[in-house]
Image: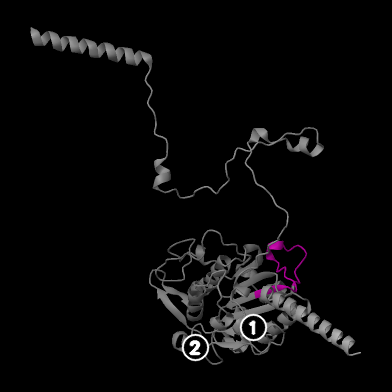
């Protein structure tokens, strides 16, 4: 009886140890549990004097693209077209610094909602997925229950609201209900909401959905101030909170170990002139251990295969026709030339440039014969004049 009890006890300990090892491995490799990343970036302001709000949004857009989120998984909403504004002294550009070092508009920006398309209705429809059937795929937020979503908004706001184009506004209650619909419809796994506006924290007060983090650039009763003006453009080019957030993100790489806890330390009161606020009570994980790239970066899916593949180089003449190969009417064997395939050198060094073949000059036989005759006659003339 004692031996049986001992056997059951050893079996229980073995199973528990295996389970703990498996859970430890799973926790190590799948800490966040998400499989894809999306971003919704919204500028709600029109008019030239709100240039900085467009620069804010494009700065975050540039950062998430650099960290790996593709355009196909970014919804970019700009309420005004600053690059093409008649007052812009440098058309087709938007700068976030007076040095004009980085054109955050660039040449590969894909704006999904522009101008008067940026409305409260369209924003909520994007979040909840309640779009007309005719809406193209590029304007849809195609998230699922394993998606980590970053939502960034900037513009003019007040206590419990954010204005859209000086014509309408979204309230903190409407925003909270939109996020709850997303959760009920399994449209996100974890969500990070960032808002840079006056009295921004008031937009976080009514959140009640799980797995949600909120960041506001200013407390209730505080203004969110601009950082600096560009004299060449004549307006402020970026807000303080976004400026220091961008400064932080520029030091983040796809393999960085920086956490959301580090990000929450961005722009303290002596830098921002306002006091950023946060909502962390709804988030199930310890935000101090959550990687910044869980929201600003992208998951890289890798499939591991046990099959070995040998890559060889074959000339086009030795490759069988695809149609004949499919029907099996012709079989040819590729010959290996022994050379290894490698990436082409995009910027060759001095050694590679020196290896370029020098041009060779070839003269015709008629030219050589004529030249020889001319030199012979010249030599005879010189010899005759010398002894005359």
Location of mark 1 (residue): 213
Q: Residue at x 63, y 65 (%)?
A: 112
Location of mark 2 (residue): 274
**Is label 2 in contact with label 1 (beta carbons under 8 Å)?**
no
Task: Give the camera-side residue of 348 and 61.
Answer: 348
In the image, is residue 240 above or below residue 281?
A: above
Q: Residue 208 lies in what quarter of the image?
A: bottom right
Label 2 or label 1, whichever comes before in sequence order: 1
Numbered disc 1: secondary structure: strand
> For the N terminus, which image quadrant?
bottom right
Numbered disc 2: secondary structure: loop
Residue 110: horizontal and vertical position, in percent?
60, 62
> For the C terminus, which image quadrant?
top left
Residue 139: horizontal and vertical position, in percent?
68, 65
| Type of secondary structure dominating the magenta stretch | loop
Q: Residue 33 lies in what quarter of the image?
A: bottom right
Q: Residue at x 41, y 75 (%)?
A: 229
Task: Give the camera-side residue of 155 and 152.
Answer: 152
Task: Give the camera-side residue of 307 and 314.
Answer: 307
Q: Is residue 374 magenta?
A: no
Separation (CA) of disc 2 from disc 1: 20 Å
Please indicate, yes or no, whether residue 11 appears anywhere in the rendered image: yes
Q: Is residue 362 left or right of residue 93?
A: left
Crowdedness of circle 1 by 10 Å Cα count: few (<14), some, many (20+)?
many
Which region of the structure is painted magenta?
A: 129-149
Q: Residue at x 64, y 72 (%)?
A: 40
Residue that lies at the very extreme toward the left in this rendered image: 388
Crowdedness of circle 2 by 10 Å Cα count: few (<14), some, many (20+)?
many
Please indicate, yes or no, whether residue 160 appears anywhere in the rendered image: no
Q: Is residue 155 left or right of residue 385?
A: right
In the image, is residue 23 above or below residue 74?
A: below
Q: Is residue 132 magenta?
A: yes
């Amino acid at each position: 009886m004692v031996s049986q009890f001992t056997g059951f006890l050893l079996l229980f300990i073995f199973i528990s140890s295996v389970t703990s090892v498996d859970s430890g491995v799973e926790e190590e490799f799948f800490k966040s549990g998400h499989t894809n990343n999306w971003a919704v970036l919204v500028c709600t302001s029109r008019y030239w004097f709100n240039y900085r709000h467009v620069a804010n949004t494009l700065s975050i857009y540039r950062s998430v693209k650099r960290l790996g989120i593709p355009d196909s998984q970014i919804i970019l909403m700009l309420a005004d077209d600053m690059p093409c504004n008649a007052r812009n002294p440098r058309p087709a550009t938007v700068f976030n610094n007076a040095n004009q070092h980085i054109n955050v508009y660039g040449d590969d920006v894909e704006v999904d909602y522009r101008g008067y398309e940026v409305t409260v209705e369209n924003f909520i429809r994007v979040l909840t997925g309640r779009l007309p059937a005719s809406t193209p795929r590029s304007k849809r937020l195609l998230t699922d229950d394993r998606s980590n979503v970053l939502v960034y908004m900037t513009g003019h706001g007040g206590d419990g609201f954010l204005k859209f184009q000086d014509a309408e506004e979204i309230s903190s209650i409407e925003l909270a209900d939109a996020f709850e619909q997303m959760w009920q419809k399994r449209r996100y796994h974890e969500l990070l909401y960032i808002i840079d506006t006056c009295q921004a924290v008031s937009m976080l007060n009514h959140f009640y959905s799980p797995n949600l983090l909120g960041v506001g650039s200013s407390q209730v009763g505080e203004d969110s101030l601009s950082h600096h003006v560009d004299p060449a453009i004549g307006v402020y080019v970026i807000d303080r909170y976004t400026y220091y957030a961008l400064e932080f993100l520029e030091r983040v790489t796809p393999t960085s170990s920086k956490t959301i806890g580090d990000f929450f330390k961005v722009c303290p009161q002596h830098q921002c002139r306002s006091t950023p606020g946060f909502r962390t009570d709804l988030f199930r994980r310890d935000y101090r251990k959550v990687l910044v790239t869980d929201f600003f970066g992208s998951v890289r899916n890798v499939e591991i295969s046990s099959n070995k593949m040998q890559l060889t180089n074959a000339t086009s003449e030795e490759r069988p026709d695809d149609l004949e190969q499919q029907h099996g009417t012709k079989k040819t064997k590729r010959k290996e030339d022994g050379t290894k395939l490698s990436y082409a050198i995009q910027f060759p060094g001095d050694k590679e440039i020196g290896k370029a073949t020098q041009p060779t000059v070839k003269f015709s036989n008629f030219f050589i014969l004529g030249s020889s005759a001319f030199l012979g006659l010249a030599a005879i003339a010189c010899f005759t004049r010398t002894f005359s």
